[in-house]
Image (cartoon, rainbow, N blue to C red):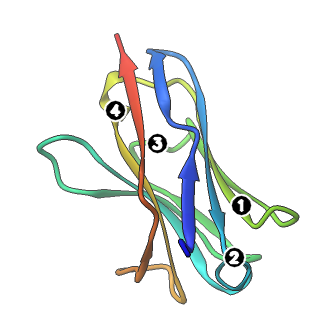
Amino acid sequence: QAQLVESGGGSVQAGGFLRLSCEASESIYKTYCMAWYRQAPGKEREGVGTNAPYGTTTYADSVKGRFTISRDHAKNTLYLQMNSLTPEDTAMYYCAADIWCGPSYNYWGQGTQVTVSS
């Protein structure tokens, strides 16, 4: 049984928006730090942001002011609201979780593709 399941990816034009979802098992959602990562073709995986349970949220400089991470406690779901998308945001987006907010994560979702066209 998958512990993390992402959804919500798709294709959008530059300037558009998407909301990604990461549904987690209850035990992970309630106690683990959860994070979003992305990996573009030919590039290294990079962190997008982290969200500690009932704690702080951090963002990569490249997405600050455009992306927002939030949780829905009723659905055990982590969200990534992405606004003002640019072609540079095109990547496979992954949800991750672990006891601590990095530097490594033991639980990963399968990923969801985001493609932004100019």
Q: Earlier in the sequence, mark 3 or mark 4?
A: 3
User: Which residue is label 4 attached to?
Assistant: 90
Q: Locate residue 4, reporting x and y percent.
A: 55, 67
In front here: 86 or 65?
A: 86
In front here: 24 or 73?
A: 24
Q: Amino acid at mark 4?
A: Thr
Q: Amino acid at mark 1?
A: Thr
Labelled pair 4, 2 in contact (Cβ < 8 Å): no
Quarter placement of the C terminus: top left
Q: Earlier in the sequence, mark 1 or mark 3?
A: 3
Q: Earlier in the sequence, mark 2 or mark 1?
A: 2
User: Which residue is label 2 attached to?
Assistant: 29
Residue ranking furthest to the left: 42
Q: Amino acid at mark 3?
A: Val
Other-residue count near label 1 (Cα within 10 Å), few / some / many at <14 / 14–19 / ≥20: many
User: Which residue is label 1 attached to?
Assistant: 77
